[in-house]
Image: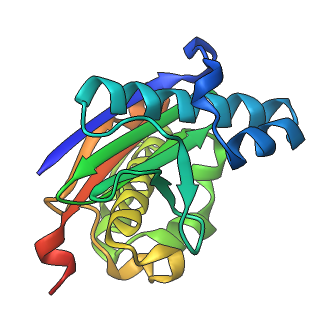
Amino acid sequence: MQVAWALRRIGSVPVPKDALVGEDWHRWMRSGPVVRRQLGAGRSVVRQLVQSTGWATWQGIQRADGGRPLLAGAPGTDVTISHSRDWVLVAIARGGRVGADVEEVTSVFGRPALRQRACTPAEAQALDRLPGPQQAAALADVWTAKEALVKASGLGLSVDLRLLGASSGTVTRIRDGTSGVSACMAFVPDEIREE
C-alpha cells in the first residue's frame, strides 16, 4: 500500500499552466471564478503529488464512467479530489483505491436531517452525549470518514450511511472538525475490493 495526500487552502495553491490539461482546460475556461479556483487548485495539488512521489508522469486527469477522476497514463495509480469552500484535499494511491473528503464545519452539520441520514444508532448516541457546540464538528467528522470510505470502496453515496460505521480501520483522520475543517482519507486495497 502506498498513499500520499495533501490538504491545502485553495488560495495558497499556485496553478501552473500544465496543471490543466485537455478537457480540464476547456472546463476551466467555461467555468466561473469559484469553480476555476477549485479545479485549478485540485489539479495543481494532484500534479505536485504525482511529481513528488515519482509514481507517474503528469499527463492530466481523465474521467471514468460516473465521473471518478483518473490519472491519465497511470494505470494502477488511483486519485481522489475533494473541495469545500476554501479547502482542497487530494490523495493518490497505488495498490488499491483511495477516497477523500474535506468539509468546512458549517451550519449544515447542525441539521437533524443530515444526522438522521448519516449516523448509525451508536454514532447518534455518541453525538447526543456531546455539548451542543461540539456536535456539528463531530457530525462533520462522521460524514467525512464515511464519504471517504464510500469513495474508496466504489459504492458511491447510494449506500445507506446509517449502516456504515465511520470507525473503519481503512479511514485516516487528517484533520478533525474541532479545527473548523474536517478531513479524512480512506484506502481499500485491491485484494479486498476484488473479493
* Visible residue check, residue 182: yes
**Position above or below: 41 against 70:** above
Q: Residue at x 62, y 69 (%)?
A: 113
Q: Nearer the viewer, residue 5 or 56?
A: 56
Toward which corner of the image does residue 50 lie, by quadrant? top left
Where residue 111 appears, as percent x and y from the top left, is 63, 58
Q: Decide which of 114, 5 is in the foreground and name it.
A: 5
The percent coordinates of residue 29 (x first, y second) are 85, 36
Q: Is residue 113 above or below residue 98?
A: below
Residue at x 55%, y 35% (from the top left corner): 43
Q: Is residue 62 left or right of residue 73?
A: right
- Work out which residue is located at the far bottom of the displayed protein and give it: 195
**Along the line of sight, which residue is nearer the eye, 170 or 1?**
1
Colour treatment of the image: rainbow
From where the camera sits, is residue 87 visible? no
Q: Is residue 112 above or below residue 50?
A: below
Q: Say above or below: 157 vs 169.
A: below
> Which image quarter is the C terminus in?
bottom left
Could you tell me which residue is drawn at 29 percent across and 23 percent down?
Answer: 52
Give the image quarter of residue 179: top left
Q: Is residue 68 left or right of residue 130?
A: right
Counting from the top left corner in percent of width and height, residue 75 is at 32, 58
Q: How many marks?
A: 0
Q: Position of residue 85 (x, y in %)?
A: 66, 34
70 on left or right of 21: left
106 on left or right of 192? right
Q: Residue at x 45, y 82 (%)?
A: 159
